[in-house]
Amino acid sequence: MPSSPPLPFSPLPSATPRLRARYSESFKCIGSACEDTCCQGFTVPVEQATWEKYKALPPSPFQILVQSSVKREPENAEAYPAGVTPPYATIRMNSANVCPLLTEQKLCGIQAELGEGLLSHTCATYPRIVHSVDSMKEAALTLSCPEAARHVLLNSNLLHRVGRSERHSAATKTENNLAGFKVEVKTATDESGTALPAYFWEIREVVLNLLRSRAYPLWQRLFLLGVFCTRLDSISRGAFDRTVPGFILDFESTVATGALRTSMANLPINPSAQLDVVLRLAGMMLHKSNVRPRFVECIESFTKGIGNGPGATLESLTAHYAVAHDRFYAPFFKSNPHIMENFLVNTIIRCEFPYGKEGMKTGSQPAMEREFALLTAQFALMRGLLIGAAGHNGKSFSAAHVVHTVQAATKHFEHHPEFLSMAHALLVESRMDGTAGLAILLRNAETSRPQMDPPNPNQGKGESKPASPGIYAPAQQDGRSA
């Protein structure tokens, strides 16, 4: 069989430019113009140093409001999920689920009355998420902020390629722009050529280049990323006798030649299994997290777009899901391929992928296969919700619908400390955490199918298995997050 033609993806020697994420530096809050203020629906942590500043405020009406709104948290680690450090104090939302320190103009009262220096770390940095590796800072944005979602998703040139001669000045500029943000600094050294933390930036470069290589459809880029992570885990365990630099060169060469195209074409397609996992992911936090109006709208759009409701079966939902994908989702994202690429890039930077926040801690060994499974779960959930939104909105499906869906879903899922561990447990329970299962979650429906209307679920015989429960549009709830 003749080999595939070379693809525009080639190894990058260290002297060539590197990709840098600098988009958070240009983000600007739109204040009272925001359609979903960040001062609503969250329990905001306050660190001890800021708490002590609040306790030392001179007497005034605003001082009374601050001290009545910021509550010291009990040192009860058992009340929090494993691995989550209890906050020293919190700003409690009021009965309307809004920060009591918010002004009538929907601006921060602390900043207006006391100045930016008395903001808590969370309030001062949101929606930026900053970390540092080898003294180099980078930041992502949490897409629970509507303006951050627009800033990231709709940017056709999200990353900057910095030349060797520009790297020092670019890094210095980034350091200056992010100077006010506290971060945990990680260092990475290695002499054996097999310890993963020493190659964070080299690995990150491969990951970002792969995601941007449109010679492959997006799902194939993600599958190749899974192969990359699996091999790196094998190297770190000593089960694959290679150095990290040597493996990176071989992997980049394999991607460039397209040698894995044939094997990827034979990966399983199971849209029913994919949708079932999406439904279960979408419904898993309904009883653990505060359900807000925008998320209700998001779920209503999704459920209507895939024909969900009483009497629906997995077969009828899958048929609606496939039509929504082929008719409305796929054409829109074919014209706007950067949107889901940007979602993934931001998730990778936010989660310190492929090491993960735990894997970046000193003395920890990254579990890259697990981090890839978590990335796949987040991607599959967001894509599934967008397919439903596309089905509901039809030909009018637009970037505004994408931003609304991503922002509302992110605010519901991403800020809950148990979401990722629960998502991984779901993949394991469903036996979808292996290579074949993750391929099913990644692979889109085939757009070459004849266009047809979804069948009426009340006609004919077919799969009678009920759809996953608990994902009918939920009622709005009040109260703070768990």
Image (spheres, helix red, strand yellow):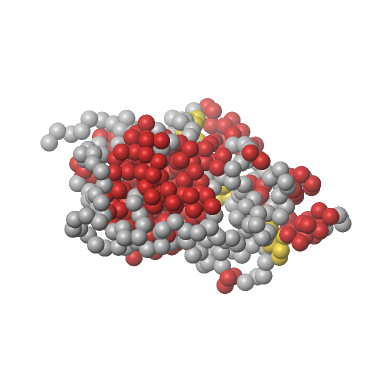
Number of numbered markers: 0
Q: Is residue 196 visible?
A: no
Q: Position of residue 452 (x, y in %)?
A: 23, 41
Identified at 22% across, 59% down, the residue is 463
Residue 365: quarter of image: bottom left
Identified at 54% across, 52% down, the residue is 293
- Nearest the camera: 257 or 240? 257
Q: Is residue 174 left or right of residue 159?
A: right
Q: Position of residue 339 (x, y in %)?
A: 43, 37
Question: Quarter of the image containing the C terminus?
Answer: bottom right
Q: Is residue 149 above or below residue 291?
A: above
Q: Position of residue 310 (x, y in %)?
A: 35, 60
Q: Position of residue 78 (x, y in %)?
A: 57, 72
Residue 107: quarter of image: top right
- Nearest the camera: 230 or 218? 218
Identified at 64% across, 62% down, the residue is 87
Q: Is residue 303 visible?
A: yes
- Nearest the camera: 17 or 63? 63
Q: Is residue 277 left or right of residue 30?
A: left
Question: Quarter of the image containing the N terminus?
Answer: top left
Residue furthest toward the right?
59
Q: Is residue 11 above or below residue 37?
A: above
Identified at 28% across, 57% down, the residue is 314
- Nearest the camera: 265 or 288? 288
Q: Is residue 20 left or right of residue 394?
A: right
